[in-house]
Image (cartoon, rainbow, N blue to C red):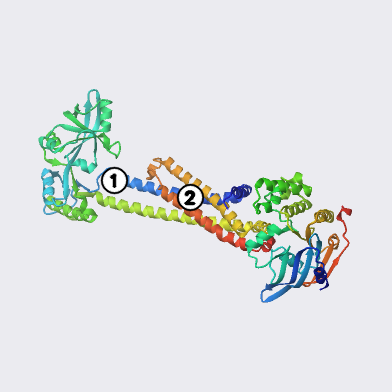
Amino acid sequence: MSVFRENVLNTNKTNMIELKDLHKSYKMGSNSLHVLKGINFTAEAGELVAIMGSSGSGKSTLLNILGMLDEADTGDYTLDGVPIKDLNETKAAKYRNKFLGFVFQSFNLINYKNAMENVALPLYYQKISRKERQERALKYLEQVGLKEWATHLPNELSGGQKQRVAIARAMAAEPKVLLADEPTGALDSTTSYEVMDLIQKINDLGNTILVVTHEDDIAHMCKRIVYLKDGVIVKDEKVKQVRASEYV
Amino acid sequence: MFSRDSWKEIFETIQKNKLRTFLSGFTVALGILIFVSLVGLTNGLQNTFDEFFNDDSTNTFFIYPGRTSMPYKGYKSNRQIEFDNGDLADIEKNFSMFVQYVSPRIDRGALVKYKNESNNYTTRAVSESYQYAEKTIIMKGRYLNLEDIKVKAKYAVIGRLVEQDLFGNEDAVGKYIDVAGSVFKVIGVFQDDAGDDEERRIYIPYTTRQLIEKNTDKVNQIVVGFKPEMGYAGAMAFDKSLDNFLREKKYISPNDQNGIYIRNVMDIYEQNQQFAFVLALIGGFIAIGTILAGIIGISNIMVFVVKERTKELGIRKALGATPRAVVSSILLESTFITTISGILGMVMGMALLSSLGEKLKDYFITNPYINLGLAVFATVLLIVCGAIAGYIPARRAARIKPIVALRDE
C-alpha cells in the first residue's frame, strides 16, 4: 500500500505504532467471522489519528488489539520499537500500564472511588508511593480543569466531567499512546467539543493519540483519518485539523 | 503483595462496599457463633449427665425391700420383706468374689439440738464402708470406722450445713449433740458435691441405731459395692444372681415385680451415657451442618462479589492490574473480612457460653463450654474454605479478557 511505502521512506521520524498484515477472526459457532483482513498501518510519534468506519468495519477490534485488550491471529505489532507478541495476561497488563492510556465511550470510572482516586489508580499498579500518586493525580486533574472536583464520586459528575476524569486517568501514567474508543459517543455536541479540545491540547504537547469514532466532525478534529471498511483500510489521508476551541 | 499500600487499597474497598462486607462478615460470624453455641450447649448437657453421677460411685447396687404382690411357696401375697444383719453377712459370704463392701442404710428423721439451736435432720445409719458409696468427703475429724460399728459407739458425722446451722462459727468436732433424745459425739464434718440435701445429713453407726431401736437386727436397705474391674457386663450378671439369691432366700416369686428392687447404678449410668452420647451426636451433626451451610453461604457471596466486580476488575486490568494483583486483592479482602468476623463470632459464642454458666441448669445444661482448639479449628476451616471459594471465581475473573469484562453491565 502507498501509505506504508511512504512511511518506510520517511525514516527521520520515529514510528510509534507499526502494524504489518494484521488478521483477526472471531469464531461465531460454526462460522468464522473475519474482522480484520490484513491491516498495514504506521503512526508516528505525536500524531493524532482518527479511525473511522461504520459499525462492523473492525475499528473497535483494531483499537482493542492496539490496546492489548485483544490479540491478533497473525501479523506483527510493534509499539515504540517493542514487538508486542506472545502476550500472557501478566505481560499484557504490564505493557498496558507502561505504554497505553485508555479512554472509553462509557467512561469506565470506578464508581466507589472519587475523581482523584480514579486518576491515581494506574499509578498504584506502577507501585508509586501513595503520596506521589495523589500529587500526580491532582496535577492531571488540574490540567483537565477538575481540581476542585477531586473528592467527588463519579455519580456526582456530569458526562463531560467524567470523560475528563477518564482522560486525566489515561494521561496520569504518562503513556506513549492514548487510545480513545468513541470518547464523545455518550456526550452531547458541546461537551463533545470540550473533550476534543482537551484531546487536541494533549496532542499539542506531543502525545500520540488514536481516536475511534464514527462522527465526521470529530474525525476532522484529528490530523489524519484512516477509513476502515470490511476489515481493510480503504483510505488514509492527512486532513487540515479543525480546532475544537472554535466551537466551544 | 502484603505491602502497606495494598492493605490501604483493600481497606478503602472494604469501607466503600459496606453491604458486601456486611454480608460476608455476617455469614461467617453467624456460622461460627451458632457452631460454638451448639457445641457448647451439647457439652453443657453432657456436664449435667455427668453431674448426676459424679458425686456417687457407679459400682453400686441399692437393694430396696418391698411388699410382695403374689403368693409364693406357701407365703401369702402382700407380705412386707425385711432385711436383717444376717442378710448382710450372707451377701458378703456368698458373693465374696464380687463384693467390695456391704453396708446397711437406715434413715430416720430426728430433731437435733445443740445448746439453743435445734433443727430436723435425716440421720442415716450405715457401716464404715458407706463412705465409698456416697463419695463423702471429710472436711475435718474423721468418718465412722469398723471399731465404732463394733462397739456401737454414739458417734455422729455431720454434714457441713448441719454444722453451719447448729454451731455457727464454732467447731463441731468433739462437741456433743442431742439426736432425738440420745447424746452423740460429733467426730467429723463432711461435704458432698450433690448439694444441700446431702449436706444436711448425719451419719451414725447402724449398730447404734439398732441398739436404740430396742436392739433390733433389722436394716432398711442394703448397699452393695462391687469390684469396679468387673465392668458393665459383670455388673449386670452380678445384679441378676444377687436378685435370684435374695428372692430364694426371702421366698419371693421370680416374677414378682414388687417384692424386692435392686437399683443398679452402673446400668443407669450406662443408659444415661448412651443417651448423652446420642444427644451429643445430634448436636454435633447440626453443628457440622451449620459450618457446611456457612461455607456454602460464603462461597455464594464470593461468587456474587466477583460477578458484581467483573466490570471494575476489567477497568483495573485495562489500567495495568496483573491477574495476580486482581486475585490477591479479592482474596486479601475476603480473607480479611472472614478472619475478623470469624474471630468475632467465635469470641461472641464463647462469651455467650461463659455468661450462661449455671443459668440454664433447669434445662439440664450446666457450664456449657467449647474446647478452644475445636472453636479455632472451625473458624480457620470456614476462613480457608471462604478463601478457596473466593479463589476460584477470582481466578476466573482475572482470566477474563479485559475487553469482555469491560462490556459487562
Q: Please, which chain is the residue tagged with disc 1 on?
A: B
Check disc 1 and give the amino acid type: Phe
Q: Which of marks 1 and 2 precedes in the sequence?
A: 2
* Residue B211 picture location, percent across and down: 11, 35
Q: Dot 1 lies on which element?
A: helix
- Judging by the rendered image, the residue that carries numbered circle 1 is B53
Foreground: A153 or B117?
Answer: A153
| Amino acid type, mark 2 | Ile
Query: Residue A207: x, y in percent?
Result: 78, 57
Report how many numbered discs are placed on residues in the image.
2
Question: Residue B188's image quarter?
Answer: top left
Examine the rendering and report whether any part of residue B75 can be seen: no
In the picture, measured across the screen, residue B85 lies left or right of residue B19, that is left
For the point 68% across and 73% down, the residue is A28
Q: Position of residue A67 (x, y in %)?
A: 71, 63
Q: What element does badge 2 sit on?
A: helix
- The residue wearing badge 2 is B32
- Identify which residue is drawn at 32% across, 44% down: B51
Q: Which chain is indicated by disc 2? A: B
| Number of other residues with Cα within 10 Å of mark 2, as a class: few under 14, some 14 to 19, many 20 or more | many
Task: Establish if B89 lies above or below A108.
Answer: above
Nearer to us: label 2 or label 1: 2
Foreground residue among A136 and B392: A136
Residue B233, image quadrant: bottom left
Farthest residue, direction top: B116
